[in-house]
Image (spheres, rainbow, N blue to C red):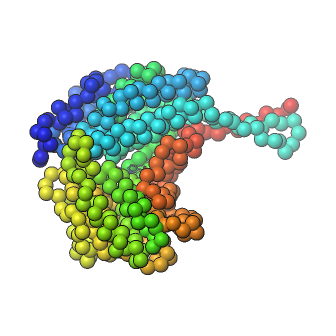
Amino acid sequence: MPHGDGASSLQRGKLSRNDLIRDKAYIDGKWIEADGSASIDVDDPFTGEIIGKAPSVSEDQTKAAISSAEKAFPGWAKELTRHRGAILRRWFDLVMDHQEDLARLITLENGKPLKEARAEVAYGAGFIEFYADEAGRMFGETIPSPVEGRRLLVEPEPIGVCAAITPWNFPLAMLTRKAAPALAAGCTMVAKPASQTPLSAYALAVLAEEAGLPAGVLNVITGKAGMIGGLLTSSPVVRKISFTGSTEIGAKLMEASAPSIKRLSLELGGNAPLLIFDDADLETAVETALVAKFRNSGQSCIAANRIYAQKGIYEAFLKAFAKRVSALALGDGFNEATDIGPLIDKAGVAKVEEHLDDAVAGGATILSGGKSSGGQLMPPTLLRDVAPDALLTREETFGPLAGVIPFAAEEEGVRFANDTPFGLAAYLCSENPATIARVGRTIESGMVGINTGLISTAVVPFGGVKMSGLGREGSSHGLMEYLNLKYLCHAGL
Ligand code: NAP
């Protein structure tokens, strides 16, 4: 595979603080080698070089992580909210102080362009900052009693020990989006990051420890997903599972959590439509499509997987979009000019190529890009006249392949958009307020981007409907996912 300037992965990804890279698990405030020194190789998707090792913990070590979170819970739950907030604030400061190192680590293990990795660190840190403040805003209620002599109170209380299981596509932000509200609420956590990108999660734990987080409040372990997931879901100590990943694994975790009636937050797969109406501003539509489709090389759960353009704007949109897509630079994420980095693995490339072949066999024409030339670099590719039932409209492509489909009237566009069991994000471009209001409400998704492809921030509720999941992350609603409401009925007053 090409190597940019020929430097090795570790030279390219050199950090100013090497101790952010750990090869041990973080359990009960200690860095612990996996039993038998079992480990998982972590590679650089650009060069294929092994850049580090993550521990592969044993069953006993997984149980020890759960016990450590259980032991830490009463003290952390009782801690003054302003003290919990202050620790989170220090963690936020440390993450931002190390933004460049953390971004390099993300690029090293995930492959995404460095500029996007820096943005991920800032986005991920935003959750810590937001929930540092939110810790002091967990208000209760007093409800007027319908009978005399009673005081009816509602108090939020932390759920208890929570587990977080996170994916590889946003290895830092997907963890802070769970850990920050959990810790602010007074819960303790066992986190299991994806095997392909564990280093960012361990680096976050290094900084959380430096911020003064007490031992056991946040534990990070890696290893065999089935074993760890099985112990987390079957443990009566774990009261909540927060999972981000595929719908298939989410459904398995839900089933396995049923016997112990756990709370669940499931941020699952998406299949986002982008509807471009005749009255859209062309430049805005192109910018929206570019960001919504190609951010993180298309490996985003809210990526615009299906682009529908109305017939009146179809040709003009394709012409302008093709110009921008063909100008995207493919290559090493460490090159500041790179827009599209390597995909996470060869299976990812094979899936995109399968969608490309299927669309072309169904009558689509390639306007830009094409197949990979080997390795994990997949060129940004644009297709026109994709059939409405092509594979890329039914499954998440998770790569830099944009297929454009024409539609006639609004009713047809909305029907295409809603013709999916998923409902995470959707996008629409129009300058007509009535179209925006009507379509924005009719579209079946948890989130709608209107004339923008960039919708995610810590202050809004992120999440899906239908098979895209349960619950919301971010905003005050995200805090409620880690709280139970206790009702106290005080009689005899
Ligand atoms: P995945 O295969 O479901 O893996 C996600 C996590 O689950 C990883 O940590 C993985 O561990 C773990 N896992 C796998 N099998 C497990 C099991 N049997 N029990 C417990 N944990 C298990 O998903 P992915 O391929 O990493 O991520 C891509 C998917 O995530 C896409 O569908 C994407 O849309 C979705 N996603 C959704 C959101 C959202 O907010 N809705 C955000 C980002 C991504 P290992 O790595 O060790 O296998």
Q: Position of residue 446 (x, y in %)?
A: 51, 57
The quadrant in which the C terminus is found is top right
> On the rendered structure, is 450 left or right of 292?
right
Q: Position of residue 141 (x, y in %)?
A: 72, 38
Q: Position of residue 182 (x, y in %)?
A: 51, 35
What residue is drawn where x is 49% and y is 75%? 410
> Number of labelled discs?
0
Q: Position of residue 54 (x, y in %)?
A: 26, 33
Q: Nearer the viewer, residue 294 or 362?
A: 294
Q: Which quadrant of the structure image shows residue 274?
A: bottom left
> On the rendered structure, is 72 left or right of 386?
right
What residue is drawn where x is 37% and y is 65%? 306
Q: Nearer the viewer, residue 231 or 220?
A: 220
What residue is drawn where x is 12% and y is 46%? 2
Asked if 287 appears above or below 2 in the picture, the reply is: below
Asked if 63 appears above or below 257 in the picture, the reply is: above
> On the rendered structure, is 392 left or right of 71?
left
Q: Residue furthest right?
A: 148
Residue 407 seen by the camera: no
Asked if 303 appears above or below 393 in the picture, the reply is: above
What residue is drawn where x is 43% and y is 68%? 276
Q: Residue furthest bottom?
A: 408
Residue 10 seen by the camera: yes
